[in-house]
Image (tube, rainbow, N blue to C red):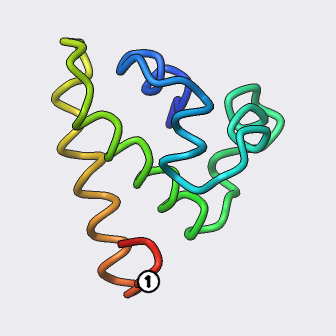
Amino acid sequence: MVDIKEWRQEFGITQQALAKASGLDVRWIQKVEAGDIDIMNVTVKRFTLLMKGISSLSEQSNNPCKMQNQVKTINGTYKMVSELLKWEELA
């Protein structure tokens, strides 16, 4: 199960920063984190945008954390999906 809140907090990222970096609404991110929106049922585009935001901000994070090795997975997921879908606006 993907735990966006855990990832975000582990990297020291605020919901507002994630919303800005991903282009998603902060309220939508809050609903995902609260479980009001099931991450397993979001659109590929929204999930990719979310991964874009986490990827971008986690690379900038100076917080050493136990999840740092997951940054490569996050970055890879974003890059793979955006390449497969060729969404120029996501690049």
Q: How dense is the environment of label 1, judged by Cα within 10 Å: few (below 14), some, or many (20 and up)?
A: few
Q: What element carries label 1?
A: loop
Residue shown at 30%/80% (left/top)?
Answer: 83
Q: Vertically, is 24 above or below 15?
A: below
Q: Vertically, is 4 above or below 51?
A: above
Q: In this view, does 83 lie to the left or right of 32?
A: left
Q: Vertically, is 38 above or below 76?
A: above
Whether residue 22 appears in this view of the structure is yes
Residue shown at 76%/26% (left/top)?
Answer: 34
- Residue situated in front as seen by the camera: 81 or 8: 8
Q: What residue type is labelled 1?
A: Trp
Q: Position of residue 43 (x, y in %)?
A: 65, 66
Choose top left, top right, bottom left or bottom right for residue 28.
Answer: top right
Q: Position of residue 48 (x, y in %)?
A: 48, 62
Residue shown at 52%/52% (left/top)?
Answer: 22
Residue receiving disc 1: 87
Q: Where is residue 49 in the image (x, y as percent from the top left)?
A: 51, 59
Q: Is residue 34 left or right of residue 42?
A: right
Choose top left, top right, bottom left or bottom right for residue 29.
Answer: top right
Q: Position of residue 38 (x, y in %)?
A: 72, 44
Quarter of the image that includes the C terminus: bottom left
